[in-house]
Amino acid sequence: GDSVTQMEGPVTLSEEAFLTINCTYTATGYPSLFWYVQYPGEGLQLLLKATKADDKGSNKGFEATYRKETTSFHLEKGSVQVSDSAVYFCALHSGGGADGLTFGKGTHLIIQP
Amino acid sequence: NAGVTQTPKFRVLKTGQSMTLLCAQDMNHEYMYWYRQDPGMGLRLIHYSVGEGTTAKGEVPDGYNVSRLKKQNFLLGLESAAPSQTSVYFCASSPDRVWAKYNEQFFGPGTRLTVL
């Protein structure tokens, strides 16, 4: 079945550091890929998405590129801020079977001033 | 627009009790979903609905029932709660299948349920 693997946290960085959160996937066909962010006490919000190979999703300074050859969708940001502290979920939808998303376990990001 | 709302926000149950979680959306979305979030497990799909009057099982449906009598509401029921159902429950909605271009799932704020 479909699965998403992302790096375990917590990840602790200093403000203005470069961020990479790794995400790899296993899926049938050609899935759509997503990054969701969950701020403390809130529900999940879509951060960015990519629907086909080599697509780059971007939003709020975050970027991720759909790499079919390495089955990866790594999240990057050049300079993180304290306000980026949250839990980040990589997810996919393969279009078959149940219609919901398949999520990774989440990566807790902590940015220190 | 309120988006996706969930009622209640918190609840404590004793083993064997029943309860219903209510999800409401005001975006006229066709698709609605119930997920549970457990520490170190990410979110897992319980049930979903592709339109009014329809429901389908997700990854972890056992012990739960759902109903979609009105397009804007999606109810999740626990008939006999068990400690293993202690979790945070999230409802989501989307206008169409999530893989369609420009579609996304919109999430509610969650319900924290504890079963003693």
Image (tube, coloured by chain):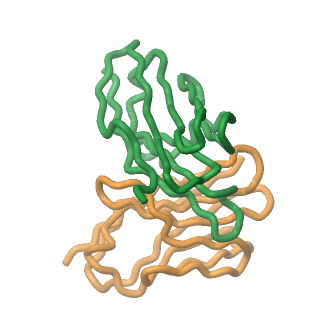
Chain colours: A orange, B green
Would you identify the image quadrant in which residue A86 lies? bottom left
**Residue extending furthest toward the left:** A113
Q: Residue furthest top?
A: B16
Is residue B56 at all visible to an observer of this figure? no
Foreground residue among B23 and B101: B23
Q: Residue at x 41, y 87 (%)?
A: A78
Q: Which residue is located at x 70 percent, y 81 percent? A: A54
Q: Hey, which quadrant is residue A53 in on the image?
A: bottom right
Q: Pick the residue in front: B54 or B85.
A: B54
Q: Residue at horizontal 63%, vertical 59%? A: A92
Compared to A90, does B114 lie above or below?
above
> Residue A27 sits in which quadrant?
bottom right
Q: Residue B83's x, y, as percent?
A: 38, 23
Seen in the image, is A59 located left or right of residue A87?
A: right
Residue B114 is situated, as x and y percent measured from the top left of the image, at 32, 29
If the image is split into quadrants, where does the C terminus of chain B sit?
top left
The correct choice, above or below, for A58 with respect to B32 in the image is: below
The percent coordinates of residue B102 (x first, y second) are 64, 70
